[in-house]
Amino acid sequence: TSGEGDGTLVVEATENTSIEKREGTITFKSLAGFSTLTVVQEGVEPVFEVGPDTLSFTYKSTSAVLTVTSNQSWKVSTDDSWLSLSSTGDMYGPIVSVQATENTTSTSREGAVTFTAGDSTYVVPVTQTARTLSVDTESLTFTSAGGSQTITVEGDSPFDVTSDANWLTLDIRGTSVVVKAAANTPITEREALIIVSASGLSEGTISQTISVTQEAAAPT
């Protein structure tokens, strides 16, 4: 554009949707020479949000989604071998899927998913429970005649059951264990242990112990 004498130059700038500021120059040319005006436009305020703030998994292999709201590029990572990450599209996509492998240990575990955006770091804590296992009784008592009783197993773990006595028969029926005791013919009381334990563990043990007592036969 051009002008003559005193005047006003109106400078219009389009919207800057980037977080980076930008610069331009306006050069004035006259008989007296050149004059340059530097124009600076600030960027928008950085926005970076992740939800939810934390992730919690059961012991089973499962996944959850983190939603990202950002106007800048970002990266995501984890140092935990039991977690894997994937995102929709490229790493500028709005969703990150977090996959947890099955926890086959006897203890819960903790990890983290870390986002970096510019100079900022955002950490999402991740927890995964261990299997749970409990029984509805700590002891069983049989008469000398024997018989059967039922133990109810509670929790979210598959389980095995064993006994140290050959006079006991154990039968798993869903989440219950039917315990059958043979008749005790001697005139002495006898005792045994039943152990209900989580199956498929790679490390540690989760178990419950039930004590069993059978009355002695009556003297003749």
Image: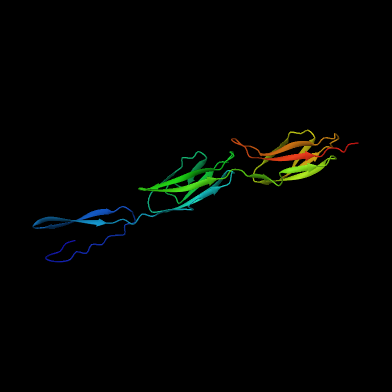
Q: Is residue 27 visible?
A: yes
The residue positioned 73% from the left and 37% from the top of the image is 193
Is residue 41 shown left or right of residue 154? Answer: left
Q: Nearer the viewer, residue 55 or 74?
A: 55
Number of labels in the image equals 0
Q: Nearer the viewer, residue 118 or 73?
A: 118
User: From this viewpoint, which residue is outermost toward the front?
Assistant: 219
The residue positioned 51% from the left and 42% from the top of the image is 83
Colour setup of the view: rainbow
Is residue 210 shown left or right of residue 148? Answer: left
Where residue 184 sits in the image (x, y, percent)?
84, 36
The residue positioned 8% from the left and 57% from the top of the image is 32
The residue positioned 62% from the left and 37% from the top of the image is 205
Q: Is residue 88 visible?
A: no
Q: Nearer the viewer, residue 107 or 22?
A: 107
- The N terminus: image quadrant: bottom left
Toward which corner of the image does residue 174 lie, by quadrant?
top right
Toward which corner of the image does residue 17 lie, by quadrant?
bottom left
- The C terminus: image quadrant: top right
Where residue 151 sits in the image (x, y, percent)?
74, 44
User: From this viewpoint, which residue is outermost toward the left?
Assistant: 32
Where residue 13 sits in the image (x, y, percent)?
27, 60
Where residue 143 sits in the image (x, y, percent)?
83, 42
In this rendering, the answer to whether 127 lies above or below 193 is below
Toward which corner of the image does residue 10 lie, by quadrant?
bottom left
